[in-house]
Amino acid sequence: MSEQPSALRERLSSPLTWHYVGFTALLVLAIGMGVRMGLDWVAIDSSAEQTVAGKQVQLHAMELATQPLHGLDKRVAQTREQLRNFFQKRIPPSYSSISSRFGDLAVKSGVRLSRVQYTQGPPGPDLTEISMDAGISGEYPQIMHFINGLERDQVFFVIRAMTLTGQQGGLVNLRLRVSTWLRPADAVASGLPATPQAEPSGAAASPAGSQQPAPAAQPARAGQPAREVE
């Protein structure tokens, strides 16, 4: 019995035994650290994947948001070219060209112009509106031909209002308000009076400076422009 404790004490006091104990402790510690590092690596890798996926979604959203801007410089240049062509082809160069064209369309359609009042609105940065208040008469097909001619003409005419003022037999009397545009310098050079402001409701509307039309109106002739035809 006394020999067993003695052998145990010898083993415990032996350096080799403590080497084994130290090695085992270090091995357990290394295994624990390895497991911890593996778990941390998995967590970091998962978080990195989520971050990358989030960045990819943000990048795709930015690409979609900026897609309408792709080629914007080309579209701007194209729009400017279209505006330049529109100004050159459809904006009349002078007041006389408006009056002449208006008269030519009347002669071509067969309607009679009893009067035409021309005025100009406030100048804009690029264009000034020219308003025409005209009284026309003719048969219904002639009037429709005249209106279609205005809408399809090379000169840019916009019909603002049409009012039936009378009808006798097959003839129709119509008051027509039309707009076109001039460049501000050309509008000033025309010397046209200013377009009157809209009058309050219930007031009698009458173009500024207009006169009573003559009973017997002559057909408008091309090449004889006038600010007011009577």
Image (cartoon, rainbow, N blue to C red):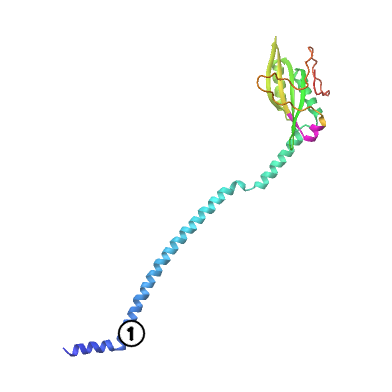
Disc 1 is placed on an element classified as helix
Q: Residue furthest left?
A: 1
> Residue 175, located in which quarter of the rendered image?
top right
**Is 211 covered by the magenta stretch?**
no
Q: Nearer the viewer, residue 189 or 52?
A: 189
Q: Where is residue 183 in the image (x, y as percent from the top left)?
A: 77, 35
Screen quadrant of the C terminus: top right
Q: Can residue 176 be seen in this view?
A: yes
Front-most of 218 and 206? 206
89 or 205: which is nearer to us?
205
The picture places residue 69, in percent across and down from the top left corner, at: 62, 47
- Relative image position of residue 165 (x, y in whole percent): 69, 15
Hey, which quadrant is residue 195 in on the image? Answer: top right
State the extent of the magenta-drawn residues as a range. Answer: 180-188
Q: In this view, does 73 lie to the left or right of 193?
A: left
Locate residue 138: give its quadrant.
Answer: top right
Query: From the viewer's perspective, is residue 47 above or below residue 113?
Result: below
Q: Residue at x 80, y 32 (%)?
A: 188
**Which quadrant does the N terminus fall into?**
bottom left
Q: Which residue is drawn at 66% across and 44% down?
A: 75
- Please name the residue that numbered disc 1 is placed on: 19
The extreme right residue here reads 224
Is 117 situated left or right of 68 in this image?
right
**Residue 17 at x, y = what percent?**
30, 85
Q: Residue at x 71, y 39 (%)?
A: 82
Count residues near mark 1 (Cα–Cα under 10 Å), then give few for <14, some for 14-19, many for 20+. few
